[in-house]
Amino acid sequence: MQENLRKIIRAFIIITASFVLIKIIMSFKKEISINELTESKRLISTEVVKLGSNKISVPVYGKLSSTIEINIVTEANGIFYGNNFKSGTKVFKGDTLDTLNMMNLKVI
């Protein structure tokens, strides 16, 4: 009986010592504070424009991407001859995107 009591006391001392050691280690950890709402400042300049034809200019360097994906579909039948037309290709106003060879088509 005495031996069982010693085992129980040892287990209790080990658990208590472990708990105290964990508390000591946790006391060295920095407290994580929840971010408080702060007033944000605008990093860009804005201006109000009137409805009409406005010239858009972006005076920065870097890469721009469209927020809306556009699918280009030709509504004619024929053979597509597009050699350099890949995703990410730069296209300017007036550029020909594709041409169709309609020589071998039959009218139904």
Image (tube, rainbow, N blue to C red):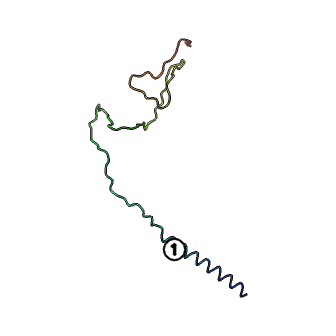
Residue plotted at (48% across, 18% down) = 99
The structure residue drawn at horizontal position 52% and vertical position 19%, both measured from the top left corner, is: 81
At x 32%, y 37%, the residue is 59
Front in this rendered view, residue 79 or 17 = 17
Residue situated furthest right in the rendering: 1
Q: Which of the 4 image quadrants contains residue 31?
A: bottom left
Instruction: Measuring from the top left, give residue 83's x and y in whole percent.
Output: 51, 22
Instruction: Name the quarter where the N terminus is drawn.
Output: bottom right
Q: From the viewer's perspective, tell me whether residue 60 is left or right of residue 101.
A: left
Q: Mark 1 = which residue?
A: 24
Q: Is residue 33 left or right of residue 41?
A: right
Residue drawn at the location 26% of the way across and 36% of the way down = 50
Q: Label 1 amino acid?
A: Ile
Q: Where in the figure is residue 19, as x and y percent of width and height?
A: 56, 75
The C terminus lies in quadrant? top right
Using the image, determine if residue 92 lies above or below residue 51: above
SS assignment at label 1: helix
The reply, left or right, for residue 91 in relation to residue 43 is right
